[in-house]
Amino acid sequence: MEFHHISVLLDETVNGLVTDPAGTYVDCTLGGGGHSHRIAELLQSEGRIIGIDQDADAVEAAAERLKDVRCRVDIVHDNFRHLERILREQEAVQLDGVLFDLGVSSHQLDVAERGFSYMQDAPLDMRMDPDASLSAYDVVNTYEEQELFRIFKEYGEERWAKRIAEFIAAARGTRPIRTTGELVDIVCRAVPKKVRRAAGGHPAKRVFQAIRIEVNDELGILEKSFRTAVAHLKPGGRIAIITFHSLEDRIAKQTLKELSKGCVCPPEIPVCVCHHEAELRLLGRPLRADAEELSRNTRAKSAKLRIAEKLPRKEELTC
C-alpha cells in the first residue's frame, strides 16, 4: 500500500523552523517526508536534512519523496530516543532546527494490518517499529488487570478504565484477545450504552490511544529527546513540536517552559545567586489548524504547534 500521510500545520511549522537556508535541520519523525520536503524547498544546496523514523515503510516512502531535492538528505532508520547517538554518528552536533511531529501517522492508522485503528478489524499490534518486541497483543493479554487500569487511566484518561480492565481480564480468561475487533467489542460492552450515546465519538478511542502509548513508550522518551535537541541547537536555532493529545502536549509545554526560565532563586533573595540562564525563548502561543486545514484533514483537529528559539549564552554575547 502506498504510504499516505497528510502533514499537519505544514506551512506554520516549516516557516517557523527554518531560519538559515544553508543550515542543518533534523526531522525526528520523518514519516512520509511531508515536512522535510517542504523544509528542503527552502534550503540551498549547502543545506542538510537528517530524517529519523523507526517505521521502515516511512523510511522507504520518504527516501523516494526526497530523492530529487537539492540539499543533502540523510535518512536514519531508528527511534529518536537515540538522538544523541544519531547526531554523533552523523557528525551533526550543531543544528539550526529540530522538528518533532508526534503521534501516529495517517498511514499507520489506514493500514488495517498494523492494528492501530479501532475502525478496522486486524490483529492486535500497534508497533510503530514492526521489529519491536512488545505489541498490543502482549499488553492486552499479559498485563495484570491493575496495570491495564493504570494505563487506561493515565495514558487514555479514560473514565471507565477500571471497568474496561475488568472486562478484558474476564474475556481473556476464556481465550486470548487477538484482534482489534474483539477488543472494541469488549470495550463497548464495558462502557454503558447510555454513556456511549451521551459522550459521542468512539468508545474505544481512549483505550486504543493508551495501549499505543504503552507499546511504543511514546511519553517516556519525550523530555529527554527534547532536551537533547535543544542542547544541540545553535544560538538562534529553533525547536518545533507538534502534539496531538494532552499528555504529550503537557510534557512539551513543561519542558520548553522550564528551559525558558532564567533566574530560579527564591523570590525573597534580592540578588540572583544561582546564575541560571534561560536556554530558550518561546515564540508566541501554541498554533492550531485553521478552518481550511480542518476541512481537508480532520485529524489536525487536536494538533498543537509550539516553537522556541535557542538563546545565546552571556559569554557568547560579550565575545
Image (spheres, rainbow, N blue to C red):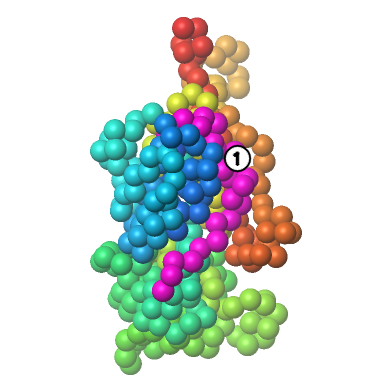
Percent coordinates x, y for residue 308 in the rendering: 56, 35
In the rendered image, which quarter is residue 91 located in?
A: top left
Residue placed at 41% from the left, 74% from the top? 1
Residue placed at 37% from the left, 43% from the top? 73
Indicate yes or no whether the magenta region holds residue 16.
Answer: yes
| Res. 296 visible in picture | yes
In the rendered image, which quarter is residue 149 located in?
A: bottom left
Residue placed at 53% from the left, 77% from the top? 204
Q: Nearer the viewer, residue 298 or 68?
A: 68
**Element type where label 1 sits in the image:** helix
- Count of numbered badges drawn on the protein: 1
Q: Is residue 235 above or below residue 98?
A: above
Percent coordinates x, y for residue 199 in the rendering: 67, 76
Residue bearing mark 1: 15
Magenta highlight: main SS: loop
| Part of the protein shown in magenta | 1-24
Q: Nearer the viewer, residue 279 or 69?
A: 69
| Res. 274 visible in picture | no
Q: Is residue 26 above or below residue 122?
A: above
At label 1, which amino acid type do we have? Asn
Residue placed at 68% from the left, 62% from the top? 294
Q: Is residue 7 above or below residue 258?
A: below
Indicate yes or no whether the magenta region holds residue 57.
Answer: no
Q: Residue furthest top?
A: 319
Q: Residue furthest bottom?
A: 174
Percent coordinates x, y for residue 71 in the rendering: 42, 39
- Badge 1 crowding class, 10 Å Cα cut-off, few under 14, some 14 to 19, many 20 or more, is few
Q: Nearer the viewer, residue 231 or 74?
A: 74
